[in-house]
Amino acid sequence: MRRVCDLISTLTSIYYVVVVVRKSPKRPHFCGDDGKNKHVKTKKKKNTAAVFVVSREKVMSSGVRTRGQKRRIGERDVWDLIVNNDDICFAHILPRLNSMDVKFLYEVNGETRKLIKRSSREEELKWKCYIEQMSSISTLEFAWENRSLWPSWWGEGETSFCIRVAKTNKLELLKWAREEKKCEWDEGTITVAVNQRNLEMVKYCVANECPIDGRACEIAAIGGQLEMLKYLHEEGKVPWTSGTAEWAAESGHLHILEYLVERKYDQYNEWACANAAMNGQLDCLKYLHETAEAPWDSQAVRFAHENNHPECVQYLLNNNCPLPEDWSYEGGVLHTTDSDDDYYDVTDEDDDSYTHTW
């Protein structure tokens, strides 16, 4: 029953109180979903439906005063809208429900089962349960109590459950899983929280000693999340990995590379420059070579050339970056051989090499 109440709450948050009007007369109606009433004149139309979202105070001005009566009237109006007005429901309500909401709505009663079967969402009833789409404690409780529905590939089921609760991006749900259900967690939970850019969830994980590894810093670097990276390294004491610089360079986040230099990061390898070159991140490539003094190898030239980043290629050539075997740079011309046809399309089969002027 609680799941039904949660669903009603979700729907009423979409349209606070909904009034369906047939054959609208020529008179002003109040509408607006921003909490303020606005005068809107409607034209008279026969046999049409119109939806007006009004403040609860405006609807209840008819004399109904008790809180219970207000709630019942509001729920009745919403329920009527759901099951008896397909044109409005299909256009404005069902599109706002995720697959799990549709499943729970289907199970409410016979009216909703018929509704879903009439809609284009019936196929989703065959889909498996997605924990990350559950938006309330009662729906998570259902999933927790029905472990037989958990996919076998989860392996350590509880840790996978906790990861997917983190994917809801709702800290209160993660707290429920950990504090009420004592659900096991691992490094994946905080990694998801970082990926969600949810600093409060990350702080909760750190404060409650969630297992953590260098992937968390890598994810922060990929997304250019400087404040997140600072917190993880300085407060969470998360260790660096070579991937922190590699991913920052690939994504073009120069400010992350600057922070790493500031904190005396020492995990550089050749892939940082190679990733920058591969993605045309010239500023990052320059910074890595000139300021961070990161190493590079022939992969940087190969990747820049393969992905058509001439400015990066020219910078690498001008600064004596090693070339792939059998490549040469003479007189401003880069010579590559067909021995590299695993990397490039050689258009002239009669020619054993092709050249580019840089």
Image (cartoon, rainbow, N blue to C red):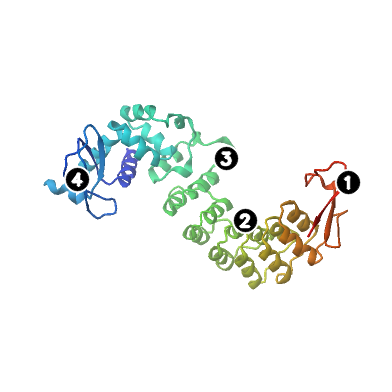
Lower position in the chain sequence, tag 3 or tag 1: 3
Lower position in the chain sequence, tag 4 or tag 1: 4
Lower position in the chain sequence, tag 4 or tag 3: 4
Q: In this rendering, would 107 be left or right of 210?
A: left
Please say if 299 is above or below 10.
Answer: below
| Disc 4 + disc 1, Cβ < 8 Å | no
Q: Residue 153: percent from the left, percent from the top?
A: 59, 37
| Disc 3 + disc 1, Cβ < 8 Å | no
Pick out the residue farthest to the left: 63
Query: CA–CA distance between discs 3 and 1?
Result: 51 Å
Report helix, strand or loop for mark 1: loop
Amino acid type, residue under disc 1 in the picture: Asp
* Residue at the disc numbered 3: 154
Q: Residue 120: percent from the left, percent from the top?
A: 42, 30
* Residue at the disc numbered 4: 70
Query: CA–CA distance between discs 2 and 1?
Result: 44 Å
Q: Please indicate, yes or no, whether residue 140 appears anywhere in the rendered image.
A: yes
Amino acid type, residue under disc 2 in the picture: Arg
Assess disc 4: are there few (<14), some (14-19) or many (≥20) residues with their C-alpha within 10 Å of its C-alpha: some
Report helix, strand or loop for mark 3: helix
Lower position in the chain sequence, tag 3 or tag 2: 3
Q: Please indicate, yes or no, whether residue 266 appears anywhere in the rendered image.
A: no
